[in-house]
Amino acid sequence: MLLTGCPSEDPVGPDQLAGKIEVGTRSNDAIFDVGSGGVTVRITQGDITGLRITIPQNAFDGSRSFTISSAPITSHTYGAALNVLTPLIRLDYGGGYAQDLLRVDVPINLPPGHFAMAFLYDEASGELEGLPPLALTDTSISVLTAHLSGRHLSDGTKGGILGSKTYVDLLIASIAASELQGIQSTGFVPGTDDWEFTNFGSYLAPKGHCAGQSVSAMWYWSKKKQRDNASSLHGRYDLIGGAFWQDNPRGYRFASTVQEALDWDKRDTWLTKFETTGQSRFPHDSLHYLSFVYGIKATGKPQYVGIRSATGGHAMIAYKAGGNKIWVADPNYPGNVSRTIELQGNGSFTPYMSGPNADDLGTPYPHINYIAKTSLISHEGIDALWKKVEDGTIGKGVFPSWQLYVRDAATGDYVEHSSDTIYSEPDGTVSLQARCTSCAYGWEPMEMKQDIMLISTDYTLLASAQQGTITISVKEGASVFAGLYVMSQVGTDPKTDSTYLDFRWLTIIRPGMSIVPSDTTIDVGEDVTFTVRTNGTAPSSARYTWYFSDLDDEVVVDGDSTYTRSFQDAGDISVGVILSDRSTGKNIDTAEAKVRVGTAWTKLYIQIADFTIPASEPNRGPLVFSDGSRANYLTFVNGMDGLSPACNALTWSGESFSAAISCEEDVSAYVLRRTGNVTGRLNATRTMLLTATMNITTTITFDDNTTQTVAEQSITITNLPITYIYGAISGPGAVVRGTAAQQYVSAMTYTIPSTSSSQLRYIDHVDWGSGETKLTVVFTD
């Protein structure tokens, strides 16, 4: 059916269309018990005689009791747009989505020249929601839906129906076809109300997240913007406005997480059921086109578009319709207001050109369906996911966790780096890796390096690596602000199967000057010497102006780059210095540091390792097991790892320290726990670790609550001279290499208990002879 006439755009909104339906006395309930075998429920008496509900086999788990009643509609406030053809029909089966589509056939008497639709009515908000049509004749209308449950209804301007109401109210209404000739608009506008990023898919949704992107944008427009007066969605969570599509990791992960929760593959298959309409006054395409126009006019809300080709489906938002066009917000073309679906003169849609994602465009989609809103796709749970968007945890536990690693200049090792600020090595180079041990693919099993790109704000590629390391050079005294785009392989081809994992802005700084120590802990009254280090040579007339947060006045020192003082009160002290040239009066550079006075160290970190051996060659490592195998490193710490906080802080009594160890980390398939204790003592000047003993037992508890001991380990260090060391883990300690380290390890054990599939193993000895095996001991916080 092709409608002609002079289109006139008629914007409508939820507030002006929310209404109320008054009803008379409700008829007696008809109750039907439905099992898993499938059945057609028929009403054979009363004012809804002829109503049928067809429940497919296995649509529900177990049996359901259907209750059907009706009440005559005595009045409503929706105006001429709603010519009521039926009573208000109440359906209740206990709520929830079915595993297959339910078909509802309702008898009607369609007035001449009218078009009819089925609507669900939300009595709490006064809003209407359309149902996808299957067929329409003069005497009946058929619709398909996956739910007949009030709790799944409106998320609109007045808060939605109460979750305790499992029933739903349904009515059939019509409108003169001549009233559908104008253009009906919702107020939803691409570039303002859609997401600003393009649908390229992700690790969670590698084929694309068009449904998640569309549903989440519709949900936000209705619930957040219209109801809560929140700002527009487009660009709201860009980390830097207008940078590029990757620059919204919260939104992008939200769309993918919603896509995953929707079970899109099943719903995509459901779309094929609309392609056979049976007897109908309107052919499929005209029926669905008019449903878009009438649905927008009656509800004032964007409508969900489901389209299919021979190879699969795609999802979009219809935000305006009329004049034989449907305007769509296509996730493959964000912000584009010119994308339309057109109804031809023969009443058929012109195939819409798009693709499952923006990397796979050029597919014609001949099958175009009106899906309305919640009939096939649940909006429940989106609100909870949105809270995770707001607190920055969206995707956690769903996307695999990855870590940024930065090369440490002092050791050459790559260490985990949690901050978004990175300081270069002295020569200005910075080397980065993204590791994801829980990803399906990655380079080197122990590291699982991922694909990364470093991109400037003007979208210039600064560096990239396929499952490897990127290195950039920063000019002296300069900084680089760039985005790290992390991708992970989801298929067997590393060239074509790498997709979005995450995005993170980084500030990379090559400091021109620094203070040593930059972060230290001392006792009250203890002297500390600060030294200014510069990349170049300070001028002969150098002046160092020191600032301390516990002093009112600066301290000026000419010529000498060091300054020694003590602190008489406990607390955190900020230290700053300005280097200037006395001869010119110009400032040259600045640096900052901090001192913690009177606060003891909270963590003891001990490691035996040889990181000159590649992680891919562990059997060359210095730790020799009882079965002849080897390992590259072994770590002891009263925390989960060297960089995370202590699980239980060290307790100090003079120079003696101790702590219980009780750590827990929830991994996707199990809970990792470490328990034990640490004790020890320093000498009076805190320049020697007289003794330290640490005992740790590591266990894992699986989802079925079974627990397995992974390892039992202990170590004792004695008479180790310590000083302040710098690196990824800084603090008082020592790094000793080769056979010189052996004398300080007076005892060490590491045992892996036997299991049903492996024998007991233990470390037999440490091979200190390579000269690269090092003992690292650090007190830190």
Image: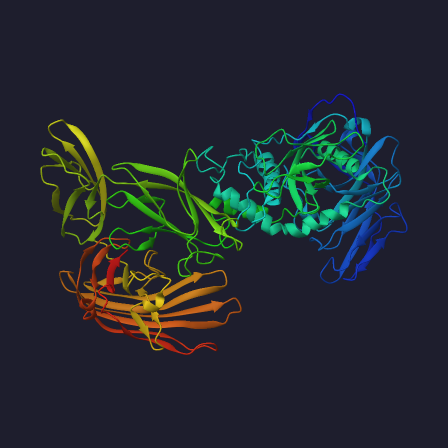
Q: Looking at the picture, does residue 114 appear above or below residue 5?
A: below
Residue closest to the eye, 662 or 712: 712
Judge left or right: residue 378 versus residue 282: left
Residue 186, quarter of the rendered image: top right
Judge left or right: residue 436 versus residue 123: left
The quadrant of the image that shows the C terminus is bottom left
Residue 458, quarter of the rendered image: top left
Q: Can you give x and y, in whole percent of width and height, for residue 555 in the image?
A: 13, 37
Q: Can you give x and y, in whole percent of width and height, for residue 194 in the image?
A: 58, 35
Residue 322 in view (yes/no): yes
Judge left or right: residue 160 versus residue 276: left
Figure colour scheme: rainbow
The quadrant of the image that shows the N terminus is top right
Residue closest to the eye, 333 or 659: 333
Residue at the top extreme, as displayed: 6
Residue 597 in view (yes/no): no
Identified at 12% across, 46% down, the residue is 565
Q: Looking at the picture, does residue 523 appear above or below residue 177?
A: below
Residue closest to the eye, 4 or 79: 4
Q: Can you give x and y, in whole percent of width and height, for residue 376 in the image?
A: 69, 47
Q: Can you give x and y, in whole percent of width and height, for residue 18 in the image?
A: 69, 34
Judge left or right: residue 549 versus residue 469: left
Identified at 55% across, 37% down, the residue is 195
Residue closest to the eye, 75 or 357: 357
Q: Looking at the picture, does residue 443 appear above or below residue 302?
A: below
